[in-house]
Image (tube, helix red, strand yellow):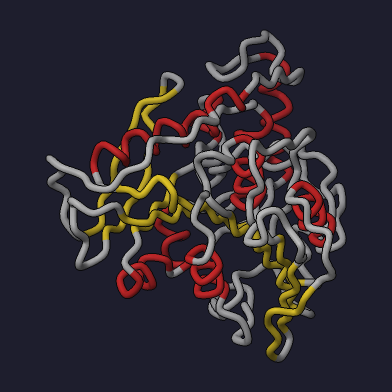
């Protein structure tokens, strides 16, 4: 699985293109000077739902598209067995890392398998790559605009938040979603973007679970407390546990503890930290005394862990001492949007 940062050739292309081309998502002639619109304007809580009617999608895996920003955007959906098209159903969005795609993220996260037993809908959006953004370059450069990271989406200020708005509207027209139980997770670059969604779409996402990626937004002011559970390895050489400035064409980013601490502060957590999980190399600690109490900000640290998804040993030796996917779902289940 190719979950990596930009290679030098791709970085060179990004910088060259930024100096001479504009894109539909960048209104200025010089894409190197980014203009970020007020993306919080779409942060509106959807109406509650007790039932659905007229929907025909049944259990299975689907590849759907939606138009946004002058492009056809793609996303993959797994609807679990036992799904009832009349009953509001929880949804988990899972965002892939840089250079990956929605199919690889489905395999990495195992959300579809867990969703089959737990009864939630799994959604895997696809980021844009260099050819789709500037017309040429490495196809394996799909990315998300996580502000500090990564790739063409960040370099050219792609409106990925707007894409997620369009995706949710399209999804809602196809399957019976529960507006109070929509959650987001992501790996690496996808984790940066997951944090951004918590900052700018707090009314749409009940809670988030980033893996191996940080809160990189320059200004983050969620409209409500958003519960967070963050997973990270201390020996991650790609997105450094202690923070850094090693992303080609990216920006400096905070440490994993600082990313979580910021949300603890935003969520009004004033109590002592509490250990919630410990096994082998893996320990989870949660801030307490939050407002509301369920709006905890938790950090699960894998001592010696690499750039990996805990519980998935086939990629970068993910620890077997912690099943991140299962812990995320337990965290989500207890935290619907108020």
Judge left or right: residue 91 versus residue 213: left
Judge left or right: residue 268 versus residue 31: right
Q: Is residue 106 above or below residue 312?
A: above
- Furthest residue toward bottom: 280
Q: Is residue 265 above or below residue 328?
A: above
Q: Nearer the viewer, residue 125 or 231?
A: 231
Q: Position of residue 266 (x, y in %)?
A: 76, 47
Q: Position of residue 12 (x, y in %)?
A: 73, 34
Q: Position of residue 263 (x, y in %)?
A: 75, 51
Figure disc tally: 0
Q: Is residue 10 visible?
A: no
Q: Nearer the viewer, residue 251 or 186?
A: 186
Q: Nearer the viewer, residue 25 or 117?
A: 117
Q: Is residue 3 visible?
A: yes
Q: Is residue 205 above or below residue 187?
A: above
Q: Position of residue 311 (x, y in %)?
A: 56, 79
Residue for point 26% across, 36% down? 173
Q: Is residue 131 above or below residue 127?
A: above
Residue for point 71% across, 13% down? 30
Residue for point 72% across, 76% down? 284
- Furthest residue toward top: 29
Residue for point 45% across, 60% down? 104
Q: Nearer the viewer, residue 132 or 177?
A: 177
């Amino acid at each position: 699985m190719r979950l990596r940062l930009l290679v030098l050739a791709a970085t060179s292309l990004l910088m060259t293109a930024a100096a001479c081309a504009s894109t539909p998502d960048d209104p200025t002639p010089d894409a190197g000077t980014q203009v970020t619109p007020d993306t919080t304007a779409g942060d509106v809580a959807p109406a509650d739902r007790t039932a659905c009617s007229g929907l025909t999608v049944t259990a299975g895996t689907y590849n759907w598209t939606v138009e946004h920003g002058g492009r056809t955007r793609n996303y993959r959906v797994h609807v679990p067995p036992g799904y009832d098209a009349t009953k509001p159903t929880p949804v988990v969005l899972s965002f892939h890392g840089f250079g990956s795609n929605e199919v690889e993220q489905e395999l990495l996260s195992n959300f579809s398998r867990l969703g089959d037993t737990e009864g939630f809908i799994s959604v895997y959006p696809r980021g844009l790559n260099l050819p789709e953004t500037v017309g040429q370059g490495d196809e394996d450069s799909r990315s998300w605009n996580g502000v500090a990271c990564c790739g063409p989406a960040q370099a050219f200020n792609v409106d990925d938040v707007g894409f997620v708005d369009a995706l949710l509207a399209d999804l809602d027209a196809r399957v019976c979603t529960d507006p109070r139980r929509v959650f987001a997770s992501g790996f690496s670059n996808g984790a940066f973007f997951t944090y951004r969604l918590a900052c700018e779409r707090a009314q749409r996402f009940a809670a988030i679970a980033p893996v191996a990626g940080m809160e990189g937004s320059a200004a983050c002011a969620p409209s409500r407390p958003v519960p967070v559970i963050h997973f990270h390895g201390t020996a991650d050489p790609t997105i450094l546990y202690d923070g850094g400035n090693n992303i080609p064409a990216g920006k400096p980013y905070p440490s994993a503890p600082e990313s979580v601490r910021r949300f603890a502060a935003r969520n009004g957590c004033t109590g002592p930290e509490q250990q919630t999980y410990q096994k082998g190399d893996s320990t989870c600690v949660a801030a307490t005394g939050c407002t509301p109490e369920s709006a905890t900000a938790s950090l699960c640290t894998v001592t010696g862990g690499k750039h990996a998804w805990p519980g998935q040993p086939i990629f970068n030796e993910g620890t077997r001492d912690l099943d991140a996917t299962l812990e995320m779902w337990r965290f989500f289940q207890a935290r619907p949007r108020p």
